[in-house]
Image (tube, helix red, strand yellow):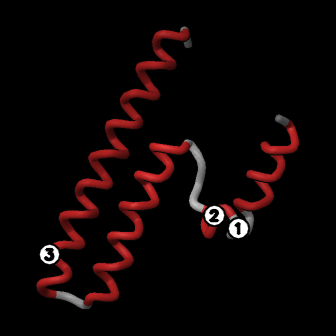
Amino acid sequence: MTVRTMHQAEADLRTTLDTLADRYEAIAAQAESGLSKGRARQISQMARDIRTVLSTGRLPGYLAAAAPLADIQNDEESAS
């Protein structure tokens, strides 16, 4: 894979994740009017988590602390 195709693949992934976050937000808005507000909050949180990853390049703290992701992130940080 060339550098150009790697950058394009990353751009495509970012676009896909942004679209996913948009869809979650739309679903959450519908859920607030019809289904349980608790479920709508969960879906909204998923959208915020995706946007956090896109803007910072890191998992939100509460997700990073979840096993086994905490082990993976700690291994990556110690290798840096």
Res 80 label: none
Please tell me which residue lies in front, 36 or 5: 36
On the image, the x and y values in percent for residue 46 come to: 40, 65
Image height of 36 relative to 25, above or below: below
Q: Residues within 10 Å of mark 2 (few under 14, many from 20)?
A: few
Q: Earlier in the sequence, mark 3 or mark 1?
A: 3
Q: Residues within 10 Å of mark 1 (few under 14, many from 20)?
A: some
User: Which residue is identified by label 3?
Assistant: 30
Of the residues tagged 3 and 2, which is closer to the observer? 2
Of the residues shown, which amino acid type is indicated by label 2? Gly
Locate the C terminus by quadrant: top right
Question: Separation of disc 3 and disc 1 at Cα?
Answer: 30 Å
Residue with the most extreme front position: 56
Of the residues tagged 2 and 1, which is closer to the observer? 2
On the image, the x and y values in percent for residue 58 come to: 59, 48
Asked if labels 1 and 2 touch by Cβ distance under 8 angstroms, the answer is yes
Q: What kind of element bears circle 2?
A: helix
On the image, the x and y values in percent for residue 59 come to: 59, 55
User: Which residue is identified by label 2?
Assistant: 61
Q: What residue sits 40% from the left and 69% below the top?
A: 45
Q: What residue sits 54% from the left and 10% below the top?
A: 3
Q: What kind of element bears circle 1?
A: loop
Q: Is residue 6 left or right of residue 14?
A: right
Locate the N terminus by quadrant: top right
Of the residues shown, which amino acid type is indicated by label 3? Gln
Image height of 61 relative to 72, above or below: below
Q: What residue sits 57% from the left and 60% below the top?
A: 60
Res 65 label: 1
Q: Earlier in the sequence, mark 3 or mark 2?
A: 3
Of the residues shown, which amino acid type is indicated by label 1? Ala
